[in-house]
Amino acid sequence: MRTVTLKTDDAFFERLSKLAKEQHMSKSELIRQAVAEYEKNVFRRRLKEQFKEASLKVREESRRVAEAFDETLEDGLDAL
């Protein structure tokens, strides 16, 4: 395993130590799990944004199709 050095203030170190003890894990394991959870959250936010962008594109295309359809509703009806 590789080593990462983290500089932190005393308050953060105390919170980290307390939480690690409460969770019965090392500080290193707690940090690894926290980073993994953060990575999942970043992925979910990116995915949500991609869905939003795709939805807006589909909405715009649907609007265009509906307008084109509306334009054809009276095609050929003048002769009647």
Image (tube, helix red, strand yellow):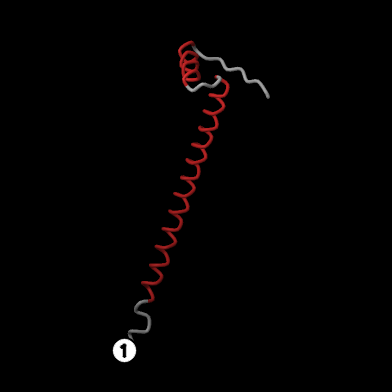
Q: Position of residue 27 (x, y in %)?
A: 55, 19
Name the residue: 49% across, 23% down: 23
Residue at the front extreme, as displayed: 24
Along the line of sight, the residue nearer the viewer: 18 or 43 = 18
Farthest left residue in view:
80
Front residue of 13 and 17:
17
Which residue type carries mark 1? Leu
| Residue 65 percent coordinates (x, y) | 42, 67
Whole-percent x and y of residue 2? Answer: 67, 23
Q: Nearer the viewer, residue 76 or 52?
A: 52
Label 1 neighbour load within 10 Å: few <14, some 14-19, many 20+: few
- Residue bearing the label numbered 1: 80
Q: Residue furthest right?
A: 1
Question: Relative to residue 79, is residue 36 drawn left or right?
Answer: right
Residue 67 location, quadrant: bottom left
Callout 1: SS: loop
Does residue 60 appear left or right of residue 26 in this picture? Answer: left
Residue 74, placed above or below residue 53: below
Q: How many marks?
A: 1
For the point 49% across and 18% down, the residue is: 21
How far from the left and from the top, in percent, is residue 45? 47, 40
Q: Is residue 62 above or below residue 40?
A: below
Q: Quadrant of the C terminus?
A: bottom left
The residue depicted at 61 percent of the width and 17 percent of the height is 5
Residue 66 drawn above or below residue 17: below
Which residue corresponds to the image point at 39% horizontal and 67% vertical from the top-left?
A: 66
Quarter of the N terminus within the rendering: top right
Determine whether, in the image, residue 1 is placed left or right of residue 70. Answer: right
Residue lying furthest bottom in this view?
Answer: 80
